[in-house]
Image (cartoon, rainbow, N blue to C red):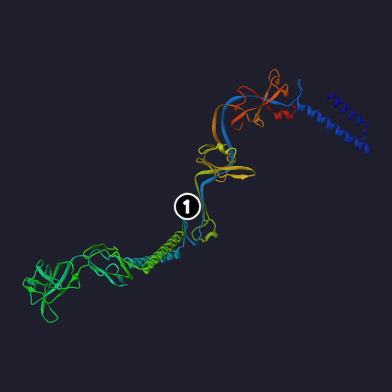
Amino acid sequence: MEELVEKDAETAEKKKKKVSLPGGKKSRKAVKLIIIAAVAVGLVIGGTKLMGKKGGETGPAYRAEQVSRRDLTVKVSGTATLEPADSYQVTTLISGAIGSAPFEEEDLVEQGALLYTLDSGDAKSSVERAQISVEQSKLSYEQAEEALRPTAPLSGTINEVFVHNGDNVSAGAALAKIVTSTDLTIDFVFTYTDPNQFYVGQSATVFFGNFDGPVQGTVTTVSNATSVTSNGKESCTVRVKVVNPGVVSDTFTASAVIGSYSSYGTAPVSMSGAATVYASGSGTVTGFQKLSGATVTKGEALCTIESETNRTQLQNAKLSVDSARLSAGSAAGNLDDYNIQSPISGTVIEKNFKAGDKVDGASSGTLAVVYDLSCLKMKMNVNELDIGKIQVGQTVEITADALPGEAFTGVVEKVSINGTTTGGFTTYPVTVRVEDYGNLKPGMNVSADVLGETAVNVLCVPVGAVDRGNTVLVPGEGAMTEDGSAVADPTKLESRPVTLGRNDDAYIEITSGVNEGDTILILDQALDGMGG
């Protein structure tokens, strides 16, 4: 090989001497031949160096390392932009003048704190009208309910029943009479008798028309003066209370004997707290279970006046109530929109409108901005090859170019499975929470190292020692010089497969293939590029 190089060089030198550099075709052809010869010499020399030689000739430069044990901390690095824990842009869909804005920038506000009030005169009127509609629809519903199911207007006793199940009735028909007490009150007139002849508590015998036998009563009141009847007779009035014997109503009249005096003519019977239940709708009576003498409570349904009309009216009335309530709720909600509150607790970082300004709904844009600065957060996009190394709760080391020399600590808060694929690679967002953020601010760009598990006292080699196919280069018998400081025979180097484990930025774990203390070789690119 050397002889060929020397001959080529000698030939080139001879041709060089024969070439005349001044112009002409022969001179230009000679220059081309010189360049071709020089390139050929360079290729031969370079090929000899890369291949390596025996017996101390120049070859690729290698750096020897020992397989050793060390601690490894798995790291996943990335960059992100800091954000507040939460943020909110305060906007409104309402148009109008701002009545008040009781806050300033940098103020701390609580969730629900009042930020703006807008003129709400028209909204208040709408709420009032909606409430009136609700009351009117409720009244209509109650009337429809009463038409279908008549109820007792007061608590008491059924005094009379006017209908039976199966009867067809029209609106206005009497159904039953209820009294609050069984006591009857009757005011009797006694002519030509001095009031002093009667006294409270005195016994009275009462006779009801069309009722066999007298009933005993008691004097409760005696008038203290006489009066003149319509026919010109002097008289006094005595009130008697009688317990209803069961069938007497206020349609009856009665007479009485008190002592040796008989009442003048007959007197009407009064029933305290009496009420008659009437049908307010037409239909067939069903479900009337009460008899005379049965007790009822106010609001208790007595029966059903069954008809398609009554049921349709009740259903329509219910729909009207529901509709009115929805309208009222919507009106009340609209009124609430005139009081703009802070949706989160935090710090006001922007106030774009003040009292007296006018807003025009959404077109006005952001009224204010509130940041929750209780902590800062960031989202790192982690490669699919590294996402399995990250878990919630891991520590994160953070630095920022804006704050040289300062370091901060965060913690992994969330590992999302909603990945994004671009160009055949998928990344997953990892949320990091920073509690003690010092001088860090939202919007700053930071670098972060997520600290994963720590492998203690594991067998390691430098990351650069591992070639493609998970192999390392080891010296075979006779590959190294006697002192082991250099490669004597590159042809005796061996590529050995290894099994890899965890790694950090500099070292990678070897679980099989080499042993502690073994020598591995790393091609030293820097030295090799300088010629060994």
Query: Which x, y percent locates residue 465?
Result: 65, 29
| Residue placed most toward the observer, 70 or 473 | 473
At a point 66% along the width and 31% down the height, the residue shown is 469
| Residue placed most toward the observer, 356 or 40 | 40
Residue 445: tell me if it is visible: no
Residue 430 position (above or below residue 527): below
The furthest residue to the front:
166
Query: Which x, y percent locates residue 287?
Result: 29, 64
- The quadrant where residue 193 appears: bottom left
Query: Which x, y percent locates residue 471?
Result: 65, 29
The furthest residue to the bottom:
231
Query: Which x, y percent locates residue 371?
Result: 51, 49
Relative horizontal placement of residue 317, taking residue 531 as reference (left or right): left
Q: Residues within 10 Å of mark 1 (few under 14, many from 20)?
A: some
At a point 20% along the width and 69% down the height, the residue shown is 271
Residue 474: tell me if it is visible: yes
| Residue placed most toward the observer, 243 or 94 | 243
Q: Quadrant of the N terminus?
A: top right
The furthest residue to the left:
260
- Looking at the rendered structure, the secondary structure element under dot 1 is loop
Relative horizontal placement of residue 403, taking residue 242 as reference (left or right): right
Residue 510 position (above or below residue 114): above
Q: Which residue is mark 1?
A: 343
Residue 214 position (above or below residue 83): below
Relative horizontal placement of residue 503, taking residue 374 as reference (left or right): right
Q: Amino acid at mark 1?
A: Pro
